[in-house]
Amino acid sequence: MGYKFSLRDWVGIGIRMNIVELSALDEVTKKSVLKKVLEYTNVFQQDEPGTNYLAHGYAMALGNLAVFVQNTSTKVITPELAQGMAESLIYIHLNRRSAQRQAPPKTISP
């Protein structure tokens, strides 16, 4: 089942790790743009019996930025919240760049 990793007194168990495509609308071209991201789900548990955590997340590169979006809970959760946030960040990044390309050049008057 997946992979294991340790972080201090926590043990992580990777349930899934896949490259998927999320989409966002480019407001200038009115076309959907696909962005490849790393989607993962991990379970964290303490070395000693205690609370377990479930985490769904997405890792992506937006321009020069590496962005991680993760939803972590002690309850059973689905990936939709983290996925929606990741898609929102792609949309913001994409349309900010589009707006900068469309902006008229700045002129400086004496």
Image (tube, grey):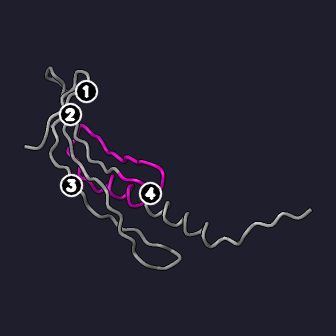
Q: CA distance from mark 3 to mark 1?
A: 22 Å
Q: Secondary structure at mark 1?
A: strand
Q: Secondary structure at mark 2?
A: strand
Looking at the image, which residue is at 43% across and 78% down?
31
Earlier sequence position, callout 4 versus callout 2:
2
Q: Is residue 4 above or below residue 21?
A: above
The disc labelled 1 sits on which kind of residue? Answer: Leu
The quarter in which the N terminus is drawn is top left
Between 9 and 71, the one nearer to me in the picture: 9
The residue tagged 2 is 44
The disc labelled 4 sits on which kind of residue? Answer: Leu
| Mark number displayed over residue 88 | none
> Is mark 2 in CB contact (under 8 Å) with mark 1?
yes
The disc labelled 3 sits on which kind of residue? Answer: Asn
The residue tagged 1 is 7
Is residue 55 toward the left or the right of residue 15 in the image? right
The residue tagged 4 is 89
- Residue 48 image offset from top left, x and y in percent: 14, 20
- Residue 12 image offset from top left, x and y in percent: 19, 34
Q: Secondary structure at mark 3?
A: strand
Query: Which stretch did the figure color magenta?
Result: 60-88
The disc labelled 2 sits on which kind of residue? Answer: Phe
Task: Determine crowd level at label 3: few under 14, some 14-19, many 20+ residues with C-alpha closer than 10 A.
Answer: few
The residue tagged 3 is 18
